[in-house]
Every structure is written in C-alpha cells, then in structure tokens.
Image (spheres, coloured by chain):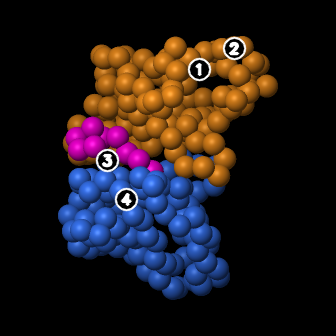
Amino acid sequence: QKEVEQNSGPLSVPEGAIASLNCTYSDRGSQSFFWYRQYSGKSPELIMSIYSNGDKEDGRFTAQLNKASQYVSLLIRDSQPSDSATYLCAVEMWSNTGKLIFGQGTTLQVKP
Amino acid sequence: GAVVSQHPSRVICKSGTSVKIECRSLDFQATTMFWYRQFPKQSLMLMATSNEGSKATYEQGVEKDKFLINHASLTLSTLTVTSAHPEDSSFYICSAVGQASYNEQFFGPGTRLTVL
C-alpha cells in the first residue's frame, strides 16, 4: 500500500467549476498535511497547509481534513485555466521530523 | 517572504564529472533543508535531510558518497553529484524550512541535470 495516494487523473473541469482533489494516507499518526501545485517543468509551490480536522479556506482554495478516515482533499472554486497543473498532496509521516511523503499528484485540466 | 533560490537552474555535463548545486534561503534562516529528485512523470523522492552544522541524513537507497551534501550555514546547502552518470539525469529540487514557518517547506526552482 502506498503511503500517500492520489488519483493521477487527469481531472478535467470546465472554467468556473469546482475542482475536487483527493488524497489518502496510510499513517494514522500523521499530523501535518500540505497541498502543493506544480506546473510542468517547475518546482512545487505551497498552496495550503492543514493540521486539524475540518475545513481551512484561503481564497478560492479549501482544504479539508478527516483524520479518522485518513483523508485530505483540496477544493478549488471558480477554477481558471491558470489552475491547470499537477497538485501534490504531501504528508508529514513522522511527527516533528519535517520529512514529507508526496503522493503521485493529480493533473488538473481546466478547460475554457 | 520564504524565497529559496537554486543555482544553476540547468546543467549539462559529461559522464564522470562532478556537479555542485547550491540552495539558498534568501529572506529567512533555514533550520532544515531537504533535497529531492524528480524523474519525468513521477513525484518527488526525498534524497536527504540537511541540518546546518551536522551531517546530512540520507534516505534508504541514496548513496551518501555519491550525493555529497554540505549545509555550511543557515542559508546555504549544497548538493554535489560526484562522478555523474546518465542515470543521474534528473530534476533536483531543494526545499527549506524556516524557524518561524512551522514545518512548511518552501521549494527552490530546481536544477535540471543532464549527464551525457
């Protein structure tokens, strides 16, 4: 079983729609979760961090965490073509080490 | 804030040569820096964890004598790929964690290494 799993996609949504990206993780003791965006040929860019169960909103982005289900998601409202990228879910598997395990990433395509 | 630079952005070298990549945190002091490698269509693979003034911690399967890491200051870490071979061709990315950023990692722009 992979430690951090994401559907590789591509996930295709029309412009203006809500894009929903999902991630599951294997270590029940994980405490820190991150979403990164990576454009082709570029390095990852931090979008959101979330540490507590529930929702965390930042602009058009909402991260959702459910530790009981070992599930974290990212919602992108009013999707724009510029949101087209690969979204990486990252989990700090071992507390206080700072080491992240990345999922394979989900490719999002927002069509005008 | 939280800007991380890498140099060079792209390097092409001959097989057998060594290549040094620099990672700098420009506007904060990095307690820890990480080095990743990413092959095409794959996710990031952690190579090593680097703390200022101490030896790097390498992930399983990463040869520490081949990938030399030096973390000389709170703003600079270097990765040297020694005796590079074509299979070392990859996208190398560093990240840094600041003293005030909890455990959020900020990534450098990456270095694309091509070994001929």
The answer to whether residue B53 of the structure is visible from this angle is: yes
The residue identified by callout 1 is B81
Q: Who's orange, chain-wise? A: B
Label 4 packing within 10 angstroms: few (<14), some (14-19), many (20+): many
| Quadrant the C terminus of chain B occupies | top right
- Percent across and percent down for residue B7 are 56, 29
- Looking at the rendered structure, the kind of residue marked 4 is Tyr
Q: Nearer the viewer, residue B94 or B68?
A: B68
Q: Do circles 1 and 4 both sit on a common chain?
A: no
Which is in the foreground here, disc 3 or disc 2?
Answer: 3
The chain drawn blue is chain what? A
**Please, what secondary structure does the residue beneath circle 3 have?**
loop
Q: Which chain contains the residue that carries disc 2? A: B
Check disc 3 and give the amino acid type: Met
Answer whether labels 3 and 4 touch (C-beta < 8 Å): yes
Where residue B74 sits, quadrant-wise, is top left
The residue labelled by disc 3 is A93
Q: CA distance from mark 3 to mark 2?
A: 36 Å
Q: Amino acid at mark 2?
A: Thr
Q: Residue at x 65, y 36 (%)?
A: B90
Residues flagged by tags 3 and 4 on a common chain: yes
Q: Which residue appears farthest toward the front when viewing the image?
A: A1
* Element type where label 4 sits in the image: strand
What's drawn in magenta, residue-wise? Answer: A94-102
Task: Return the mark for residue A25.
Answer: 4
Rendering coords of residue B23 (x, y %): 47, 29
Which circle, 2 or 4, is nearer the viewer? 4
> What distance separates the C-alpha of mark 2 from that of mark 4?
40 Å
